[in-house]
Amino acid sequence: MASASQHFDTLCIHAGQQPDPLSGAVMTPVYFTSTYLQEGLGKHKGFEYARTRNPTRDAVQGNLAALEGGKQAIAFASGLAATQAILELLDGGDHLVLGNNVYGGTFRLVDKIMARFGIVYTQVDTSDLAALKAAITPKTKLVMLETPTNPMLGLSDIAAVRTVVKEAAPNAILAVDNTFATPFNQQPLSLGADLVFHSTTKYLNGHSDSIGGVVVTNNDDLAAKLAFIQNAAGAILSPMESFLILRGTKTLHLRMARHNESALKIARWLEARTDLTAVYYPGLESHPQHELANRQMKGFSGIVSFDTGDTEKTRRVAERFKIFALAESLGGVESLVCHPASMTHGSVPAADRAKLGLTDSLLRLSVGVEAAEDLIADLEHALKA
C-alpha cells in the first residue's frame, strides 16, 4: 500500500490500490455493477449504488489524489464535467474571474451555459497580478485559470495569484487546471490552490482511449460539496474509464520524462528556423516567463505551438505530416498536431483569439514518445510545404 511519503514514481504505480481481497488480483478489477447486496436495512459495505461509489472509481480517485498531493479526488465523466461541477459551487449572482486563455470548451461552458443561470464572469490575464486584483469584486467567489495555457503556453504564478485572491476576496476559491503540466511537472495545491482539476483524457490516461476528468482538493468542505453535486447530477467516471486511467498513471512518470525531453528538443529546433514567426514553449530561454517556469515547474511538458505567419501555408503544413496525426486532443503516447483556431478554440470569438495572439496560422503540437529525431524529420517534411 502506498503512503504519501513515498516518491512520485511509486505513487503512480501503487497509490489508491491494493490487491483484490477476493482473488488477490494485483491489478484493480473493473467492477461492472450498478448495485450492491445489503446484508440488512442500513447494513452494507460502504457501497449502495454505483452512481455514488464504485470500487474501481475509488481506486483511481485515491491514485489521482496522491499524485496531486491532495486528500480527496472526485472523478467525473469528462474534463468539462469536472469543470462544470466546480462552476456549480457558485450561486446565481456570484462573480467568476476566468483566465483569458482557458480551453475553448471551458469558455463555451461559462459563456453559453453558466451565464444563463446568473453567473457573472470577467476574463483577465491571470499572469498580470494588477489586472487580476482589479477584476476581483466583493461578489467574486471563484478564480479559475490554466497554467500553462492552451495553446499559447502562458504561465501564471500560482503562489502569487493565491496571495492576490486571498487578500482581495478571502472566501473565493482558487481553481487551477493542471491538465497541460500534470502533477509530474507541477502541483498547484502545494502552491496555494484550493482545487486542481484535469481532463484525465490527456496525459493522465496517456493513451487516447479514455474520456474523463477529476478534481482534487485538501479542503474537506469543498470535497463534500463536489461529491454531492456529482451524485445529484450523475456525471460519474465509468468503471472501465477508471481502469484505463489507472493503467495510464502507472507509466505517467516515464512518459512525462520523455514528453518533456522531446518537446524541448523540438522547440529548440523550431526556434532555430527562419521561416516561422513565433515558437511558444516555456522551456525556451526566449519565453517571457521562462524564469517562472523554472521556479514553478519540474519540467515543461509536451506541448509546443508555432506560427508560420501564413494561414494557407499552415493548412498545407498541417496536411503533410506522416507521423504527427491531425487531430484534436493531446497528451497521448502518439504525436498529434492541432489547428486551435478551427478545432479546440473554434468557439472562442475571433476578436478574442486575435487579442491572445492565437492566429489562424498557429499550429499546436502534442509531442508524443516516439523518437524525437523521427518527429523532427516529420516536421522538416511538413514545413517544406
Image (spheres, rainbow, N blue to C red):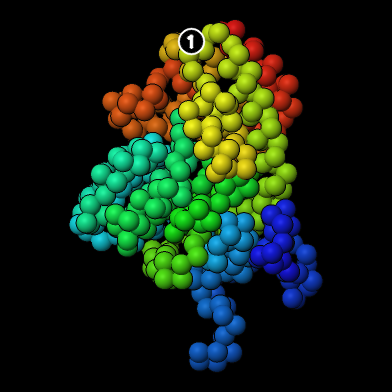
On the picture, is 142 further left or further right than 55? left
Image point 44% across, 11% down: which residue? 310
Residue 269 sits in which quadrant? top right
Disc 1, SS: helix
Q: Quadrant of the N terminus?
A: bottom right
Image point 57% across, 26% down: which residue? 285
User: Is residue 338 positioned above or below 3 on the image?
Assistant: above
Q: Amino acid at mark 1?
A: Lys
Choose between 365 and 133: the one closer to the eye.
133
Q: How busy is the neighbourhood of tag 1: few (under 14 within 10 Å), some, or many (20 plus)?
A: some
On the picture, is 175 further left or further right than 369? left
Q: Position of residue 271 (x, y in %)?
A: 58, 17
User: Is residue 123 positioned above or below 19 on the image?
Assistant: above
Choose between 295 and 10: the one closer to the eye.
295
User: Is residue 192 positioned above or below 125 on the image?
Assistant: below
Image point 50% across, 65% down: which residue? 218
Q: Count every numbered label the image shows and give the total.
A: 1
Q: Quadrant of the C terminus?
A: top right
Q: Position of residue 102 (x, y in %)?
A: 40, 39
Q: Position of residue 296 (x, y in %)?
A: 55, 44
Please say whether residue 190 is visible from this viewpoint.
Answer: yes
Please say whether residue 335 is visible from this viewpoint.
Answer: no
Image point 22% across, 57% down: which residue? 139
The residue that label 1 is drawn on is 313
On the picture, is 134 further left or further right than 83? left
Q: Position of residue 338 (x, y in %)?
A: 51, 27
Choose between 271 and 254: the one closer to the eye.
271
Residue 240 sits in which quadrant? bottom right
On the picture, is 13 further left or further right than 189? right
